[in-house]
Amino acid sequence: MGDRPSGSPEPSAASAPNDTSRLEPADPSDPSEGNVYLGGRFLREFGILTISALVLAIVIKTFLLQAFFIPSGSMEPTLMPGDRILVNRLAYRFGHIERGDIIVFADPTPTPERRGVIGGFVHWLGEGIGVVHPSNDDFIKRVIGLPGETWEIRDGVTSIDGRTIAEPYVNHADPDTRSFGPQTVPDGMLFVMGDNRNHSGVSRFPPPSGLGYIPIDKVIGQAFVIIWPPSRVGWLH
């Protein structure tokens, strides 16, 4: 027995509804239909890939790795002008800042922004994909003093809590023999200096001549490798 109720009339072609809204597959024998179909599919897939790539780039830059360009000689000889480095943004989510780390941090005294909600979002998006320059500069220095430690520099020699520390990374070709301190690093702050002590706005000087102490919450991440130029590619120490 069939599934049709008894007594139901058989359908006919004449009684079938004329559904003009039904989409039919493109006829592969018609070149114009094939081109429209392929063109629309390409644009759709290209748009999806482009948006996915932008989202991935923003996620990587915001949470994982970020590339930076070294514009000055404040970290010579460790970093030279023109070097490009990678910064691990997760380094201090799972570990602690240690003396000797090379860190990148946001401007501790930023200029206030007045962009509005939409303007701020557009600027943030542009920064995320690397086509807009940040409103405030980021800095790269080496951590020398941690919160609660007392630092002192005598004739260019640095000591922490009364003990001299080894600093093989400083620019010995142009040594800084000045004396500073002693001072104690405040809670939640870092004492940082560039390796090129004579040419670096470091924590020894308050703004605007220097940077002063750096709030830990301003730290972006740890610089760990030089990726450009090829002749200088290598790990940072």
Image (cartoon, rainbow, N blue to C red):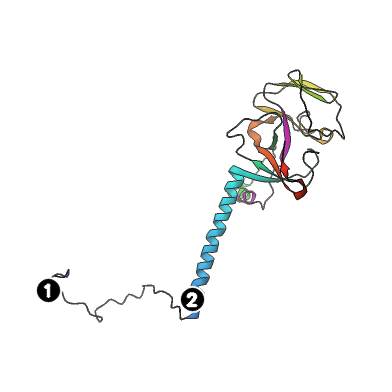
Residue with the mark numbered 2 = 34
Residue on which the image places disc 1: 7
Placement of 15 over or under 59, stated as above or below? below
Give the residue displayed 55% in from the left and 56% down from the top.
51
| Observer-nearest of 12 and 167 | 167
**Residue 236, image quadrant:** top right
Instruction: Please state which amino acid type lies under the numbered disc 2.
Output: Gly
State which tag comes first along the sequence, 1 or 2. 1
**Residue 167 figure quarter:** top right
Quadrant for the N terminus in the image: bottom left
| Res. 149 image quadrant | top right
Does the image show residue 222?
yes
Task: Return the x and y of residue 107 as percentages of the image width and height.
Answer: 70, 37
Q: Which residues are magenta?
A: 125-145
Q: Is residue 126 above or below residue 1?
A: above
Q: Position of residue 216 (x, y in %)?
A: 65, 31
Identify the mark at residue 207; answer none if there is no mark.
none
Count of marks overlaid on the render: 2
Q: Is residue 178 left or right of residue 207?
A: right
The local secondary structure at tag 2 comes to helix
| Element marked by disc 1 | loop
- State which quarter of the image contains the C terminus: top right
Q: Is residue 143 left or right of residue 28?
A: right
- Across and down, in percent, residue 77 comes to 81, 38
Residue placed at 65% from the left, 24% from the top? Answer: 187
How far, Cα to Cα, is label 1 from label 2?
Answer: 46 Å
Asked if residue 221 is positioned above or below residue 115 in the image, the reply reads: above
